Image (cartoon, rainbow, N blue to C red):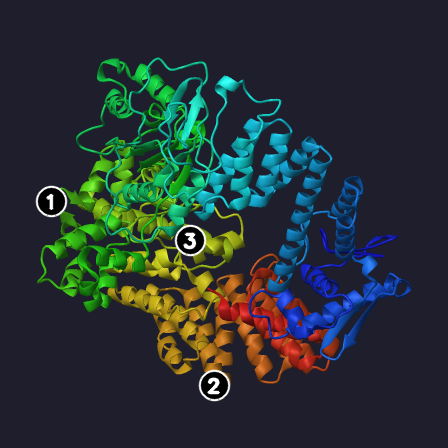
Amino acid sequence: MEFRLLGTVAVETYTGPLPLGPAKRRSLLAALLLSANTPVSVGRLTDSLWDDTPPSQARGVIQGHVSRLRALLVGADAEAYGVELATLGDAYVLRAPETLVDAQRFEELLMLAREQRSPGDTVLMLKEALSLWQGPALSGAFAGPPLKAAAHSLEESRLATVELLARTYGTLGEHHRAAALLSAETAAHPLRESLAAELMLALYRAGRQSEALDRFHRTRRLLADELGIDPGPKLADAYALILRGDPGPSAAAPAARVRVPSRPAAPSAAPSTASPASTEVGAVSVAEPPVAGDAAGAPPVVRRPPSSAQPAVHPADPLPVDLLPRAPRGFQGRTAELASLTRAAAGESPVCLVTGPAGVGKTALALQWAHRNEALFPDGRLFADLRGFSEAGEPAQIDVLREFLLALGVPPRRVPESAPAAAALFRSLTGRRRLLVVLDNARDSATVRALLPGGTDCVTLVTSRHRLEGLIASDAARPVPLDTLEVDDGTALLAGVLGEERVLAEPVAARRLAELCGGLPLALRVTAARLAGRPQWTLAALADELADERGRLAFLDVDDTGVAAALRLTVQHLPPDAVHQFARLGHHPGGHVDPYAAAALAGTDPVAAAAALERLAAAHLVSETAPGRWVLHDLVRLYARGLDPAAAREALVGVLDHGIATALAAADTAEPGGEPCFVLPDGFRRPAAVRDFADRAEAMRWLSAERENLALAAQAARDAGLEDRAWRIILLQWPQVVWRVRDNWTPLLELALESARAGKDAYAESRVLTLLGWVLTEEGRAAEAAALLEHSPRLAREAGDPLGEATALINLAVVRAELGELPAATENCARAVELARREEDRHTEMLALQHLARMRLTARRPEEALAHARTALDLGPEHEEAARRSLLLAICGEAHLALGQEDDGVRLLDRAAREAEDAGYDEGAVRALEVLVRTTAEPSYRVRHERSALRLATAP
């Protein structure tokens, strides 16, 4: 028997590994093995199995895992190996010889290796120790904080062993083996300086000096980018040792040798002595600019010597150039984005792409990062505004390249006249430099490609309102998308421009301003500019003005800077179909849009709408928050709405009728046979295409996801006087209402009732009253429900709606039964059954029989209840109406219990609960399981009841 911790937590036996089961059981075993032969408290085991608040039954879970683990060990004849899992009060102890635990054997072999006199013996011991590792320590376990710490400690011990083995290989002169061993580990741990230092020395001593120096520069850059630190003593000492020492068998000829002292020395007047920060190439010495931020004594950065293929033109001035504009003032937040830029800039010849909508602060972010990381670019920083979205038009490529070449020291007369030649020269001159090139406001990928530098150590930072996917495909550009600011950062930006005193004087108004500006930095800066020029204005007064949507964009314009102006420059570059779609999106009443809704707004089809949405997303005028779902920023929506105000009603009717058609399809799929408001409104505009739902689950997901959109659409319809659309859109959500009846549907149904009454539609009023009354009943407001439902059957009769009358009678019966009026309730249900049978509507008959069966059960007539429930079950096929079947099966089960037939009752209630659980109908599951918990002591029913009740309580 062997216990494994160095890899996947396991117990190996002669017959194979024991089936330990879930991750938490492995965690328990790992925690016990790490403290083998020492008691481990339940509290510490709890910390190991859960990294947040443990469940109330944590102790029981641990006891269950201990019991199962003990049984597995006993079954594997653990006693014969001296292994025992024992209970000691409030703790457990796993007694086992240390030789059976691989982590203990690893530590023993490591100790023996250090005691060997012969390097060859040390190597054998270390290799045997490392062979015990079969992957990351404690794999397969759920790592709570104690186990995470233990895994980290074990990994540190392994890495130290690898370094020791490499040094021992070096002692034996086997530097290639040391380099091979360290290369793999350094790739996995690129920020571990001791590994990088050992690898540098192994490479150097193996005659691979250039690779050793390259390793130093890569590690140095990673440390700066990821951690913001300089190399530590180990890495710096290894670098200096390489530069001081013999070049080795693979070094270049002496004339091309790079010589740098290990530490800066005082400059000498002697002409033969190079500065400490210089590279000597043959007889030419070129001064290297120092790297800002390096600690005193740290080795300077050394450029690679030029190759024999020299560029045709040499800049006369090698000093760093800087075309970068000043850093933005009042910059706030963006910590995650700045870190993303740092990571993106760490690769070879990286192109970093900052994208986002107009006014989101792309240029500010790029400049902020560039100024913060000046030390990374000792050869300078270039900047060009490509004006991709400017009314003035884009500059010619040759003009941008000429400015770059002049800045790099090329004489004006030597700048090529053609853009391709100038681009080639630019790439050649930047081939051995460490430059930052910032290309601001790029409109397309082709413009950027011509301006990319040639050096592998250069970084190009591009900003654009477009996604520039072509640049990602051709040049592996790393996108850094930029979104709006959080409210706290927006408030801080206001404070940075206005002064903290003014913002602190009105903190609530300042936050409201940040919210009204939608987190858009441009809008916030314009707002701050208006306030800064008017010290007598209060923040609250300006917030009140901005609250009016009709004038908000006008208030957010100052001189030539404003949100509307920025958006106009983006829109003018779009094709007509995308502009048309964008203008219609402004009239969408909801929060998000899909291709079907977009098509209904624009009067097109979903394929054309999806293509237009993709174009708008590429221009960052809409954002795709999930596959097939787009949203508009509030200020962008206001701008779009103003592009075609005359189309508002046409667009609204289109999207309302789309909602009605899609909700009808969803309701028909979710509850086949249901019959709410199949009569379409006057002037109904049938959409070009309606979403098809594969099954009930998909239809219910759509109803759930679109609930807010449908509610906003209904309110917009009511406001526009389209009452016939408003109540239909609300009532068509009835499958979702039934599914989540206690989910605050009352306000929406009251809006539907207002719309029905405003339209003087008896059919609609009856239908809405019926559903609203039932919801009020389920909310415990029986008296209110009864007062409403009294009118519903009469209104249905007046409207000639017998099925509506039957449904109203059923819901009135339910509330009367709730109020103790059982005879009247039974009479109503019986009348509903007659109406449904006369209309040959099985769905409504099934519903009426279900409630009639429940009332017979309440009246202590289980035989009649069972008969009604069985009749109802015979009406509907098993694959339909999962909720209804679950409730009927539960009634049958309770009826059998009342008849003294406990086995049949428990069986049917269990089946009812399982069908409800499978369908996600938590309310039905809770009802059935409540009866089972009262009837039987089976613990699984209580566990399932708690889970269903928790899901029901926390459902969105």
| Residues at discs 1 and 3 in contact (Cβ within 8 Å) | no
Q: Residue at x 31, y 53 (%)?
A: 485
Task: Say which label, 3 or 2, has the lower sequence index.
Answer: 3
Expressed as whole percent of the image width and height from the top left, the position of residue 600 reads 33, 44
Which label lies toward us, 3 or 2? 3
Label 2 vs 1, first from the N-terminus = 1
Res. 762 in view: no
Q: Is residue 731 left or right of residue 920?
A: left
Which of 264/115 is in front?
264
Q: Which one is earlier in the sequence, the residue at label 1 or at label 3?
A: 1
What secondary structure is found at the residue carrying circle 1?
loop
Asked whether the beta carbons under mark 3 and mark 2 sit within 8 Å of each other, the answer is no
Query: Which residue appears farthest toward the bottom when viewing the image?
Result: 820
> SS of the residue at dot 3?
helix
Query: Decide: marks 2, 1 in contact (CB < 8 A)?
Result: no
**What's the residue at 41%, 66% (across, down)?**
804
730 or 791: nearer the viewer: 730
What residue is disc 3 on? 664
Q: Nearer the viewer, residue 569 or 759?
A: 569
Which of label 2 and label 1 is nearer to you? 1
Name the residue at the right extreme: 80
The residue identified by callout 1 is 559
Q: Residue 831: x and y, percent?
A: 48, 74
Q: Name the residue that disc number 2 marks.
A: 821
